[in-house]
Amino acid sequence: MDKLARLFIRRLRHLSRREARRIALRNGLLESKIVDVDGHLTCRYSPAFDTTRLTGDLIRDDIWFRRNFGDWLLPPKETGNPTTGSNGDGVVTAGLIHPPFASQLGVLPRARRGAIAHHGVLGNGIDRRAYAVGLVDRAAAPPLVSHFVSALVLARAMRSSGRSLREIVYTLTRVTPVITLHAPLAGFEGQVLRLLEKTRLAPGGPFAIVDADHMFNDDYFDVVEGEARRRLMIFSGAGVHRVTGNALRRRMLSALSHDLSILSIAEKRSDIPSLLQISADLSLETGKLDRRFVADLVEVLYPDETIETLGLPSDSDARWLSLEDLVLAFRPGRHVRDVLHVLAVLIERNRGDFEEEDGDGSGGGGDKASASGSASTSTEKASGSGEKSKSSDTESSGRWKRDKPSGAEVIQPEPLPAAGETGHKPPATVGTLSGYGRAKDWALDLKADLDDYRASILAWSEMSTKLLLSGPPGTGKTTFVRALCNSLQIPLVVTSVSTWLQGGHLNDVIDRMNKTFVEARAMAPAILFIDEIDGIGKRQPAEREYADYWNTVVNKLLELLDGAVRSEGLIIVGATNRPDDIDEAIKRSGRLETHIEIPRPDVPTLADILAHHLGHDVTALIREPAADVQSEADDGFSLRKFVADHLQDKAEDERKGAGR
């Protein structure tokens, strides 16, 4: 877990303890005093209950405190008129109903409180006052799992923005900000809004949420004028794009003129209107869930568990999970093994839902008559036989419909053998490849730069992280990228232009392109490999047919490549057989600026390739009977001869080097 995520988790727990102290103070369980500590004014809490019964045994004292004073930590109920409680149900003071006295012997007369509460130590040398207040902290209600999940998502989005925490806090506190927040996660909007409305995690919180969909004129602000909390106007969900043009402009101006911050939050980036994106002071986005996210949540909720010994889902499996899935699985009191079992079941279920929806979407061969016939049949079944009809919007089994992923494949690096380890063939790395020339040098330099970047010696902007590979089919462009994945030991996200174009409609194509980059950024550091990049073509003159379609696709790729430049941890490699068919803007500085052509292998390179793949079998190839030589071509080409000559030259060079 990174530092920002740890900060958010610690703050949620601190807020929970602080709320428990305030409730205890309000209910008479604690007393407070403002004291000066090195020039800083701070609130000092002291117990108002009998601390003579504390033994110093934390478990025993915790049980005693919860049994006697657990009800005192419940939030008081607000009432209109101060009255005296009846039937022993509690005491009403200044409009607050206090819980019943758990033990009348637990509270001391005011004259004796200070002597016991503020002085003395327990038998084990612990300060009695601090120990007693710590029991209040331990009895505090823990933060909700949904709040932990939302906080981790926000931490990841802030880290991906490239902005420092100081800059983000300044934006949130010193100006009236406009913020856009995007994550392709089901349930993301509701969970984050609940976190902002119920906790003080964000500066100025908790907020009074003002839904922009319900605001038609300035009179609406009178409804929330008496709200003590800071107000936040939200444009949320897929309905955001319904408000456009002058209507959107008027609502934004009305909110800003009333000193309301604006938050646009959506699971699809395309649902956020361009006016909000342009005027945003802070744009945050993140991708699908991955193994690291699940590991962070396990670390938060099960701090005593060893992550390495647990069977956590892989990156390719975790991306099928939603925030609701995590809230369903990580329930208080559940064993971590049961949690992981539930996650595995949900992953398979969600993957099955996606394949089912894919099958329904591809089978569009039926005509309208058959469709209407099946609809009437299902209606008859629902009313007559009692069978449930299949809904087009929601599933009868209670499952959620999910946004389809980008179609990219995630490949994890093969582990490199440890020093001195034998017994299995090591994975292919860039260092073991032959015939790649400049591409191999670029990869080795990148490996050294990545080590320096991880050691905070080199900035990401100073590294060469974008490459265009070209060459005839069969020259090993895909093999090179797979070896690069093993060399760098980072995930490889594989996609192609043909995968993007499967959507057909322009909005679907743009959405797939955007999701691919978001998913790759979520796994950073990672390699994004775009195969057949020449299929995206060049921008066309306006008079050409379908020019708007292809120009929009090319412009979107340019925008994504520019965004990748600002996102640390993303290495982009494009592959093509026809580099001349690619728009020149894609190959400009800051995009795929490094262009390396992989030629067909010459004879020495081919010998190296055969020696690498055949290993010790190459010796048997050379020592075959001489009669087989007659079967070779008459043009002077001899596979056995050039392999033997190459190995002999290589051995001679090694002997000369050893002699020197």
Image (cartoon, rainbow, N blue to C red):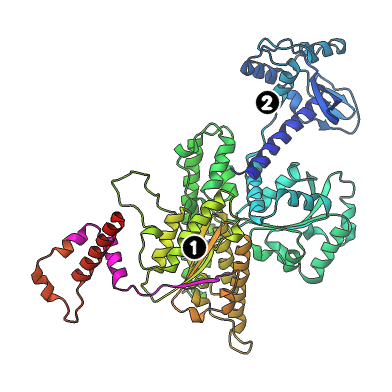
Q: Assign a secondary structure to mark 2.
A: helix
Depth check, front residue: 167 or 153: 167
The verdict on residue 625 being magenta is: no
Query: With respect to residue 397, does 334 lie above or below?
Result: above
- Up the image or down, 585 lies above or below 412; here it is below
Q: Is residue 81 above or below residue 69?
A: below
Asked if residue 601 is among those painted magenta in the image, a careful observer would answer yes
Q: Residue at image x 69%, y 54%?
A: 163
Q: What residue type is labelled 2?
A: Arg
Compare marks 1 and 2 and give the one earlier in the sequence. 2
Q: Tell whether 443 sits left or right of 452.
A: left
**Numbered disc total:** 2
Q: Is residue 354 visible?
A: no
Residue 330 position, x and y percent, is 56, 39
Q: Name the residue under label 2.
A: 138
Q: In this view, does 646 lie to the left or right of 243?
A: left
Q: Residue at x 58, y 87 (%)?
A: 545
Q: In which quarter of the image is the N terminus?
A: top right
> How far apart in space, not on screen, are marks 1 and 2 (Cα)?
46 Å
Residue that badge 1 annotates:
408
Region of the chain picked out in magenta, as a range: 591-619
Quadrant, the C terminus:
bottom left
Residue drawn at (43%, 54%) of the image: 413
Amino acid under disc 1: Ala
Residue 181, quarter of picture: bottom right
Out of 487 and 399, give the one closest to the viewer. Answer: 487
Percent position of residue 309, x then y: 45, 37
Task: Name the outermost residue toward the bottom.
Answer: 543
Q: How crowded is mark 2: few (under 14 residues within 10 Å), some or many (20 or more)?
A: some
